[in-house]
Image (tube, rainbow, N blue to C red):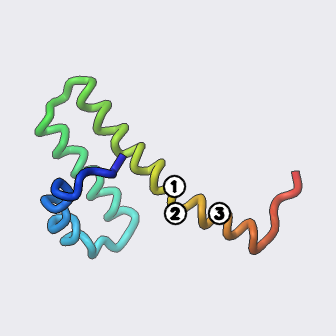
């Protein structure tokens, strides 16, 4: 999960803050893909490293969904009513 020690966060925060001008979903996808590519170039192309890279992105996606998208969906259900099943 993305919860690393504070001192480890500091070394990444400046570079990540410099990316605050990401404008579109395509721009975001490009940046994520480049980070994955950089990880691959540094750590190699063995299955375990490629797997780690893909699942790091998937786990972050799951956490983002849990913390933000699911909450928004719950709000919309409360505002508009649940679906009768």
Query: In the drawing, what numbered circle is on residue 73?
Result: 3
Q: Earlier in the sequence, mark 3 or mark 2?
A: 2
Position in image of residue 68 (x %, y %): 52, 63
Query: In the drawing, what numbered circle is on residue 65?
Result: 1
Position in image of residue 24 (x %, y %): 37, 69
Name the image quarter holding residue 77. Answer: bottom right
* Marks 1 & 2, CB-CB < 8 Å contact: yes
Q: Which of marks 3 and 1 is nearer the N terminus?
A: 1
* Marks 3 & 2, CB-CB < 8 Å contact: no
Determine the residue positioned at 18% across, 71% down.
18
Determine the residue positioned at 32% across, 64% down.
27
Question: Rounded to the nearest whole Å, what is the CA distance between mark 3 and mark 2?
Answer: 9 Å
Element at badge 1?
helix
Element at badge 3?
helix
Question: Rounded to the nearest whole Å, what is the CA distance between mark 1 and mark 2?
Answer: 5 Å
Question: Rounded to the nearest whole Å, what is the CA distance between mark 3 and mark 1?
Answer: 10 Å
Q: Residue furthest top?
A: 47
Seen in the picture, residue 79 relative to 53 is either above or below; the reply is below
CA neighbours of label 1 inside 10 A, class few (<14), some (14 to 19), many (20+): few
Query: In the drawing, what numbered circle is on residue 40?
Result: none
Determine the residue positioned at 36% across, 62% down.
26
Q: Nearer the viewer, residue 21 or 27?
A: 21
The residue where tag 2 is placed is 68
CA neighbours of label 3 inside 10 A, class few (<14), some (14 to 19), many (20+): few
Name the image quarter holding residue 11. Answer: bottom left
Say left or right for 26 vs 62: left
Position in image of residue 72 (x %, y %): 60, 67
């Amino acid at each position: 999960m993305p919860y690393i020690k504070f001192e480890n966060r500091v070394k990444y925060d400046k570079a990540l803050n410099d990316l605050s001008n990401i404008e579109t979903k395509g721009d975001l996808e490009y940046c994520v893909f480049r980070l994955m590519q950089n990880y691959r170039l540094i750590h190699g192309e063995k299955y375990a490293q490629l797997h780690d890279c893909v699942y790091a992105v998937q786990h972050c996606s799951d956490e983002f969904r849990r913390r933000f998208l699911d909450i928004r969906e719950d709000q919309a259900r409360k505002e508009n009513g649940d679906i009768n099943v």
